[in-house]
Image (cartoon, coloured by chain):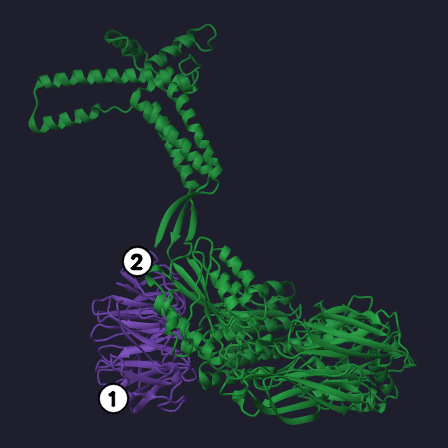
Chain colours: A purple, B green
């Protein structure tokens, strides 16, 4: 782990502001496919596909984006892209080449009933094919659906007590199908076992601050399968590495525009080679680092 | 991409280089003792020092030239160009950038749109243009009823960055109606900016316009009036089409809310002009507006509807009448006053504040306007908030200042400062200011604005607009703060809420730099705001009203219930404005927030409603200006309004103001409370403003505070005298008729003056004032041209209505009329202005090639022909950026100077190289003893040479450093060294040296000798036995 601070250079920095292929207007979410392709969605509602070195491959645009743009991406067990279509209160499913699978859409209605959503932040699928869809706004909850999209149960709710959320901005599933949740506005990480009929809180840590070990709006997180968790912090403009018990192992990045600096990063994603691709949103670019 | 060149900022200093040979001559001789190589080396270094110094004086700089090209497209979005062609412009620029922009060079493209104003749609952008779905967002800020190419070119020039070649591509029909584009274009060319022009051909269209409606100059009640309507069919007949247009001519006469249709006549109009004449009679004194309109049977026969209306005005004088504007949310509060005024022969018309006048013409029939407890903005939800626009306020003021109409404000809890009228033109026109400058007199208000609308189109612009509106409505003692997200939650103006009075200008200036980011949640910002409110309270500020306005596109996480509860406990109301970027989803939390804290919730889809909402909300802060104090008896002073009136009953409240420090202000009544601040307790005051009078009565007319007055016998007299005092005089001793016409861009006014016996009146001094369509006033003089006939004129360069007021003499009623320029030049049937297009393209930018006229098919989906010209071609002067390097040269000069001295003063031997080599060789291969001996001899020879060189150097240096070889007084250090030298050493060492060779004395030993000699001299100050 390199020492914290702005001096640590990223391996690769790519992308800049623009609407052409390969350029970004405030990218906010990313996911890596089983075929090692990097999918990134930005404020033009385009999903652009790159190789792991940032070479543009292809792109398509979400057809409806007047109300707002998607802010969450992940891959399901079949290698299809799950899109958190935030402002349209739904999860969309696309094939990796951009074909929309309408029959697999979940949601689309704003509300607090099961199957209805506020602002959808992320959708992930566990090893059994169940979907977990997080949202914020009035509800700040996570709903669980079976592989056919039938509602199973929900948990969370708006609040700061353990088990509640304020803006669960992102989720990741570990090998035990436990959910690791970036509880952004509570500045903490929660780990929840929702494999059964109800959700059980397993771990929780984090408090607001800019010192190592503290968090400032954790917007995304990723597990490396080797006992580490990486969290990207929106207001601290950095990536922080933790062990699985929540002990900080170091930070990378600071506020700014130079390589190695971040400006309101929204997301990060880990590739099979152990490299982290940080979505440096307000700098309209991606930085690849190895921690 | 970048080339580098060298330049000098002050090249004249380079002339100093001619001194270089002199340096060589003098230096060559002076360092002759150095030996050949060192001498040339030293000379070279010295020359270099000199040259570097000269370069520093000449301010040497590196110049980088860039191949990058920036093209700013200037799109004419005025209405003289059909809508489909305007849409095609967007297609063209998007495709042109994709086709020609050279990404490897870092080319940039930007877009400026213009009509009456110009606005930047896309600042120079290093990629394809980010215009979504052909929508031009900047057109929200641009009126399209005129073409101001000059303004657009200036804006385009300002938008360029300095690191690229610059070109403007103008897409226009060339019909500018404002400004002078050619003059600006010449400046652009002078600055090396190229201009290409894409002409928009206007095809011949069926077009008909109402040129004018004219009325006779002498209109009298009961006499027939001849009205002429001039129509112009500009359609060009062809073989297939005779160009005739069928339609209906409608002439309407308006006075007040009444509309009389005088003519409604079907007509078929041939190409050319046609005049329609008819007669009618005016039976009633009033100010009349005549409107002629043409309605074609087939809409396709008339391409521009904006030029289908013309207007004229007629004023038939009679008894004066009054307009009373009341708050539409509280109707009927002035009905009793209206009834009493009518009972005293004053005609009164009522107007609700949500159905306000829209033109100065509508106010002309009234001689006094009363604002009866009406706030500037009122209403509940976003849809029904109504307000006086800046322009309507200006109309009210001009109506008094230039046209002589009376203006009276009568109080109530929604009037004056409490009604949000602070810092408006209306306040300037009144005899009192609406704010209290002394914070001890009234408690203050505190407002926090929280900005979260970053995803709204032009969100940054609108957030600045609303913040500005709110700030304007606050009083000087009020506190204001603004919270936005910029990496974290931040106060805009330092650490919290600050008083507006001393900081208003700085606050407005800082607003311009605001760029609110995407706030993740409300809660921390709301806690900051709460802490801000508490902090000013803790500092001892007497804050009575605390209010917060939150604007949001609705997607931050809502606040913690505990935070909301803290607001409720602290009595802080929160109004929320949900701007519909993300649909209704975000509205519920915002609605809840407003409902829970007692604020208002506004759901807005059109950002244009936002300024009214902020005016309305900022009004809440002004409530402390209301003075409720039951049983006050007014203190009266002599005033024309109060003549013959005494015994005012008590009243229970009024709105506090500050009387203006002006001798013209005539105060009639003051409230007894607060007694120590009578300047803030004005009840009745009047003054003359321009040619009219304005007045204030800060209590009400009997609804809430002065309800005891309604039963008082003096009520009628007081209010009748108050209204009549401010009313425009209606009686003239003489008889004047006035006519006006618009011709060749001038309004011509003709006044005929007769006396009661119908004899002409001569030698009058008449002057007039006109209020133009943008509410700017122009003064003009009338000169007598014949018996009783006076003529004046002034330029009319704007379309719309001009209102004229002519003063016959002091104290007399002004004569009023109006003139109308029916439509902007923008709406004339026009063709492409090829002359301007070619002139602009022909301009040759300094250092580059002239521009091109890019001809081709111009229609939606068919713009490919236009792409044949490379608008990013590099035939313009390259951008050059400079970097001063003289400070670096100065440092270099110092280093070289050191080298120069070093070379002259230090000899570096090279014998060690040979020794080293031999030593290494001996170690590796072994060497004979004889060789070692030879080696020693060689070494001795080298030492000798070095000593000789030292001596030479010593000699040479004497040329520069006078006295070094001369005996000199020893330094204290030398003395000390000499004193501590062991006594045996000096006796043995010199001896050995003497034995070997006198010539091999080292430089140091010779110095020591010289020192000894100096000490032995009689004049020496030291004892010589120390050595």
- Relative to residue B113, is residue B45 drawn left or right? left
Residue B726 location (% of width, % of height):
82, 78
Mark 2 and mark 1: Cα distance apart in space: 42 Å
- Relative to residue B703, is residue B885 drawn left or right? left
Query: In the image, is residue B31 above or below residue B212?
Result: above
Tell me the SS state at disc 1. Answer: loop
As drawn, the label of residue B36 is: none
- Out of A97 and A79, give the one closest to the viewer: A97
Tell me the SS state at disc 2. Answer: loop
Query: In the image, is residue B531 above or below residue B927?
Result: below
Dot 2: few (<14), some (14–19), or many (≥20) neighbours within 10 Å?
some
Res A265 seen here: no
Question: Residue B658 sits in which quadrant?
Answer: bottom right
- Relative to residue A42, is residue B513 drawn left or right? right
Callouts 2 and 1 close, C-beta under 8 Å: no
Residue B348 location (% of width, % of height):
78, 88
Subunit bearing disc 1: A
Residue at the top extreme of this rendering = B1018
Query: In the image, is residue B673 above or below residue B975?
Result: below
Residue A71 location (% of width, % of height):
36, 77
Quickly name the residue at label 1: A147
Query: In the image, is residue B619 above or below residue B899?
Result: below
Subunit bearing disc 2: A
Dot 1: few (<14), some (14–19), or many (≥20) neighbours within 10 Å?
some
Question: Residue B700 sits in which quadrant?
Answer: bottom right
- Out of B475 and B188, give the one closest to the viewer: B188
Question: Residue B946 sits in which quadrant?
Answer: top left
Residue B278 location (% of width, % of height):
72, 90
- Out of A246 and B616, give the one closest to the viewer: B616
Quickly name the residue at label 2: A9
| First in residue order: circle 2 vs circle 1 | 2
């Amino acid at each position: 782990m390199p020492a914290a601070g702005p001096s640590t250079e990223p391996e690769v920095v790519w992308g800049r502001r623009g609407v052409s292929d390969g350029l970004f207007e405030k990218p906010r979410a990313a996911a890596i496919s089983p075929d090692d392709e990097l999918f990134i969605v930005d404020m033009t509602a385009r999903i652009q596909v790159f190789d792991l070195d940032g070479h543009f491959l292809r792109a398509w645009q979400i057809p409806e984006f007047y109300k707002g743009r998607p802010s969450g991406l992940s891959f399901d067990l079949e290698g299809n892209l799950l899109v958190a279509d935030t402002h349209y209160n739904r999860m969309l499913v696309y094939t990796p080449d951009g074909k929309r699978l309408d029959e697999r859409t979940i949601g689309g209605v704003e509300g607090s009933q099961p199957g209805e959503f506020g602002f959808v932040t992320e959708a992930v699928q566990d090893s059994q094919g169940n979907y977990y869809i997080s949202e914020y706004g009035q509800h700040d909850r996570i709903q669980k659906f079976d592989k056919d999209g039938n509602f199973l149960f929900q948990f969370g709710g708006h609040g700061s007590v353990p088990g509640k959320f304020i803006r669960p901005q992102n989720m990741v599933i570990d090998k035990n199908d436990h959910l690791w949740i970036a509880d952004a506005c509570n500045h903490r990480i929660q780990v929840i076992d929702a494999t059964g009929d109800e959700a059980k809180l397993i771990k929780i840590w984090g408090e607001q601050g800019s010192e190592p070990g503290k968090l400032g709006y954790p917007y995304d997180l990723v597990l490396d399968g080797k006992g580490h968790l990486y969290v990207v912090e929106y207001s601290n403009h950095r990536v922080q590495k933790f062990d699985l018990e929540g002990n900080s192992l170091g930070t990378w990045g600071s506020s700014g525009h130079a390589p190695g600096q971040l400006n309101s990063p929204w997301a990060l994603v880990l590739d099979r080679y152990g490299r982290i691709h940080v979505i440096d949103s307000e700098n309209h670019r991606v930085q690849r680092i190895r921690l | 991409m970048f080339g580098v060149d060298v330049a000098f900022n002050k090249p004249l200093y380079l002339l100093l280089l001619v001194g270089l040979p002199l340096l060589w001559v003098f230096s060559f001789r002076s360092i002759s003792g150095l030996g050949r190589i060192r001498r040339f080396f030293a000379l070279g270094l010295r020359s270099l020092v000199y040259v570097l110094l000269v370069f520093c004086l000449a301010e040497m700089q590196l110049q980088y030239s860039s191949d990058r090209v920036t093209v700013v497209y200037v799109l004419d979005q005025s209405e003289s160009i059909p809508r489909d062609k305007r849409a095609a412009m967007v297609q063209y620029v998007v495709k042109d950038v994709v086709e020609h922009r050279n990404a490897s060079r870092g080319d940039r493209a930007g877009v400026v749109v213009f009509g009456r104003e110009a606005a930047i749609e896309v600042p120079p952008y290093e990629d394809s243009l980010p215009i979504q779905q052909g929508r031009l967002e900047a057109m929200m800020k641009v009126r399209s009823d005129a073409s101001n190419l000059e303004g657009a070119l200036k804006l385009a020039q300002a938008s360029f960055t300095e690191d690229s070649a610059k070109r403007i591509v103008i897409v226009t029909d060339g019909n500018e109606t404002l400004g002078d584009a050619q003059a600006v274009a010449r400046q652009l060319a002078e600055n090396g900016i190229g201009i290409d022009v894409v002409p928009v051909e206007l095809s011949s269209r069926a077009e008909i316009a109402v040129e004018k409606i004219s009325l006779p100059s002498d209109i009298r009640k009961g006499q027939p009036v001849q009205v002429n309507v001039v129509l112009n069919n500009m359609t060009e007949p062809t073989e297939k089409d005779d160009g005739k247009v069928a339609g209906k001519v409608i002439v309407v006469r308006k006075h007040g809310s009444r509309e009389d249709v005088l003519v409604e006549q079907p007509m078929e109009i041939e190409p050319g002009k046609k005049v329609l004449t008819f007669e009618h009679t005016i039976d009633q004194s009033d100010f009349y507006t005549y409107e002629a309109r043409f309605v074609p049977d087939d809409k396709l026969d008339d391409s521009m509807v904006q030029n289908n209306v013309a207007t004229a005005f007629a004023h038939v004088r009679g008894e004066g009448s009054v307009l009373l504007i009341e708050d539409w949310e509280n109707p009927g509060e002035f009905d009793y006053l209206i009834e009493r005024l009518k009972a005293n022969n004053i005609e009164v018309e009522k107007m609700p504040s949500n159905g306000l006048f829209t033109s100065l013409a509508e106010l002309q029939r009234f001689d006094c306007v009363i604002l009866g407890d009406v706030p500037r903005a009122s209403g509940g939800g976003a849809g029904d908030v109504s307000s006086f626009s800046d322009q309507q306020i200006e109309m009210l003021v001009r109506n008094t200042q230039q046209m002589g109409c009376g203006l009276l404000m009568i109080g109530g809890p929604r009037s004056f400062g409490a009604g949000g009228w602070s810092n408006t033109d209306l306040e300037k026109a009144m005899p009192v200011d609406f704010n209290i400058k002394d914070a001890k007199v009234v408690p203050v208000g505190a407002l926090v604005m929280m900005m979260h609308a970053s995803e709204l189109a032009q969100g940054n612009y609108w957030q600045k607009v609303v913040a500005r509106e709110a700030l304007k409505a606050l009083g000087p003692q009020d506190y204001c703060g603004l919270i936005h997200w910029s990496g974290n939650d931040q106060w805009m103006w330092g650490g919290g809420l600050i008083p507006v009075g001393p900081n208003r200008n700085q606050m407005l200036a800082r607003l311009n730099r605001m760029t609110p980011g995407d706030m993740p949640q409300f809660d921390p910002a709301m806690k900051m705001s709460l802490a801000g409110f508490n902090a000013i309270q803790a500092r001892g500020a007497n804050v009575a009203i605390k209010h917060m306005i939150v604007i949001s596109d609705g997607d931050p996480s809502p606040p913690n219930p505990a935070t909301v509860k803290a607001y409720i406990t602290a009595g802080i109301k929160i109004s929320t404005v949900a701007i519909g970027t993300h649909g209704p989803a975000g509205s519920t939390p915002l609605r809840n927030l407003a409902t829970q804290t007692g604020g208002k919730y506004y759901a807005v889809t059109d950002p244009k409603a936002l300024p009214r909402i902020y005016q309305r909300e900022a009004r809440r802060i002004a409530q402390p200006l209301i003075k409720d104090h039951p049983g006050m008896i007014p203190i009266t002073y002599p005033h024309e309004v109060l003549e013959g009136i005494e015994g005012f009953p008590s009243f229970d409240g009024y709105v506090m103001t500050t009387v203006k420090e002006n001798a013209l202000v005539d105060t009639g009544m003051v409230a007894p409370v607060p007694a120590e601040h009578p300047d803030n307790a004005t009840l009745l005051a009047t003054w003359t403003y321009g040619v009219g009078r304005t007045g204030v009565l800060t209590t009400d007319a009997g609804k809430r505070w002065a309800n005891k007055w309604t039963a008082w016998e003096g009520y009628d007299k007081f209010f009748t005298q108050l209204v009549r005092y401010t009313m425009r005089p209606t009686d003239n001793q003489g008889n004047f008729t006035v006519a006006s016409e618009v011709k060749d861009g001038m309004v011509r006014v003709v006044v005929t003056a007769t006396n009661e016996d119908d004899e002409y009146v001569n030698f009058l001094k008449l002057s007039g004032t006109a209020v133009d369509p943008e509410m700017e006033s122009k003064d003009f003089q009338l000169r007598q041209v014949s018996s009783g006939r006076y003529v004046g004129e002034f330029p009319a360069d704007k379309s719309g209505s001009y209102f004229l007021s002519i003063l016959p003499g002091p104290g007399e009623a002004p004569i009023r009329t109006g003139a109308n320029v029916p439509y902007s030049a923008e709406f004339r049937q026009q063709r492409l202005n090829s002359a301007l297009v070619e002139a602009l393209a022909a301009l040759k930018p300094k250092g580059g090639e002239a521009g091109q006229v890019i001809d081709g098919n111009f229609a939606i989906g068919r713009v490919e022909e236009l792409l044949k010209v490379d608008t990013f071609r590099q035939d313009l002067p390259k951008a050059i950026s400079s970097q001063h390097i003289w400070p670096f040269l100065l440092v270099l000069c110092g280093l070289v100077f050191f080298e120069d001295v070093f070379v002259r003063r230090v000899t570096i031997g090279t014998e060690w190289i040979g020794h080293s080599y031999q030593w290494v060789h001996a170690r590796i291969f072994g060497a004979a003893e004889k060789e070692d001996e030879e080696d020693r001899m060689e070494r001795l020879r080298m030492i000798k040479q070095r000593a000789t060189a030292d001596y030479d150097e010593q000699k040479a240096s004497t040329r520069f450093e006078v006295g070094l070889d001369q005996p000199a007084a020893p330094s204290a250090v030398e003395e000390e060294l000499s004193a501590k030298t062991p006594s045996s050493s000096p006796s043995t060492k010199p001896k050995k040296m003497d034995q070997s060779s006198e010539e091999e004395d080292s430089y140091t030993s010779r110095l020591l000798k010289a020192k000894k000699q100096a000490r032995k001299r009689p004049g020496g100050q030291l004892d010589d036995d120390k050595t």
